[in-house]
Image: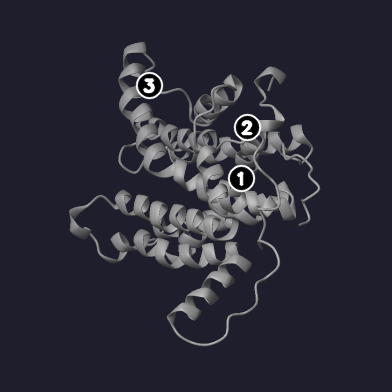
Amino acid sequence: MSAQNQPSTQDQPATPEHIHEASGPAAPEPTGTGPEISSLRVVQLVRRHPLTAFFVWFFTVGQAFAFYPVLVPDAAGLPPQLFIVAATLFGLLLPAVVITGLVDGRSAVRALGHRIIPPRRGVAWYALALLGVPLLSITLTVLLVGAPVDTSWSSTVTVLIPHLLLPLLLTFLPNNLWEEVAWMGFVQARLQTRRGPLMAAVITGPLFALQHIALVVGNSPVAALAVIGLLAVFAIPFRFATAWIYNKTGNLFLVGLFHATGNAATGGSGFQTGLLATIYPNAQIASIAHLLAFALIGVVAVLLTRGRLGLQDTPNRSA
């Protein structure tokens, strides 16, 4: 990326003392009994272990939403994707915001919200977020499968609007943006201040993959484990790429957009079939080409930054 498109240090994501597993010296353990004392104990436990609290909530309450249409087929006649969106909003976003407030205070919640606002500069980062994964996914699919039968301009335009732009909106606004507020803005940002950017991605990747477990239920146990295992492997370089964008721009809007364009370019939004899945309906690669594209971009990011992924060294890294 060119120097003029990189944000100043003022726009770098915050990596001060307020992003770590504990929020300072532990308060004295409350004594006594009763609802108020129990609530204080829960709050203190969350403050000591915010990431653990987050995952306990997500893998119980959050996954209950995701598994509902699996356990109750045709639940209320609603599309299964609505329950995935609910899992994102109430299982990921809600605990990320609440725990941030409990641990770091209202100023940290405001800072998290500020990082969702679309940046006014950084053309190169917008280009990467919007075009990088779709173009790379299309290129990989053409190389592996061959060009589509109909490559006319009229046919291309007809497909782009309902099967790329519409899925992009339907996956970005209700889902992928808020996913990344939680995964990148809360989980990975905290981990990388203590473990470094590479190890943070290695830890976050498999956990991120596990959130998709409801989508593989119904397959044989071997097939389900194989899919989740493969997704976990690809999720690690994907988290390299998201960390690079976040650390260089300080912006979660771009991270969510990067995530969403990959989904829109291949399988789709859950509400609408994606571009490559429409053009190549019988080619399995068309639904997973974005995983390869994400991985390639993530590996390139590691090489370009020598493993730093844009994270600035700070004196509070070990706090």
Relative to 312, 239 lies left or right: left
Residue position marked by numbered label 2 in the rendering: 249
Q: In the picture shown, does residue 183 fall above or below 145?
A: below
Q: Distance between the residues labelled 2 and 1?
A: 15 Å
- Image point 77% across, 51% down: which residue? 317
Side (left or right) of 18 relative to 180: right
Specify which label sits upstream in the sequence, 3 or 1. Answer: 3
Q: Is mark 3 on a helix, strand or loop?
A: loop
Comparing labels 3 and 1, the label whose residue is closer to the camera: 1
Q: Which mark is residue 149?
A: 3
**Mark 2: which secondary structure?**
helix
| Distance (Cα) linking label 3 and label 1 | 35 Å
Q: Nearer the viewer, mark 2 or mark 1?
A: 2
Amino acid type at image mark 3: Val
Quarter holding the C terminus is bottom right
Is 31 placed left or right of 71 in the picture?
right
Query: Measured from the top left, where is residue 201 in percent x and y?
Result: 65, 50
| Residue 197 visible in the current orientation | yes
Neighbours of disc 1 within 10 Å: few (<14), some (14-19), many (20+): many
Q: Which of marks 2 and 3 is nearer the N terminus?
A: 3
Q: Position of residue 159 (x, y in %)?
A: 33, 23
Report, in whole angstroms, how far the alpha carbon at label 2 lies from the one at label 3.
40 Å
Residue visible at 24% across and 61% down in the picture: 73
Q: In this view, does 266 lie to the left or right of 13?
A: left
Circle 2 Cα neighbour tier, 10 Å, few/some/many (<14 / 14–19 / ≥20): many
Q: Which of label 2 and label 3 is nearer to you?
A: 2
Q: Are circles 2 and 1 on residues that touch, CB within 8 Å?
A: no
Asked which secondary structure carries label 1, the reply is helix
Which of pointers 2 and 1 lies earlier in the amino acid sequence?
1
Residue 268 visible somewhere in the drawing: no
Q: Which mark is residue 239?
A: 1
Dot 1 amino acid type: Arg
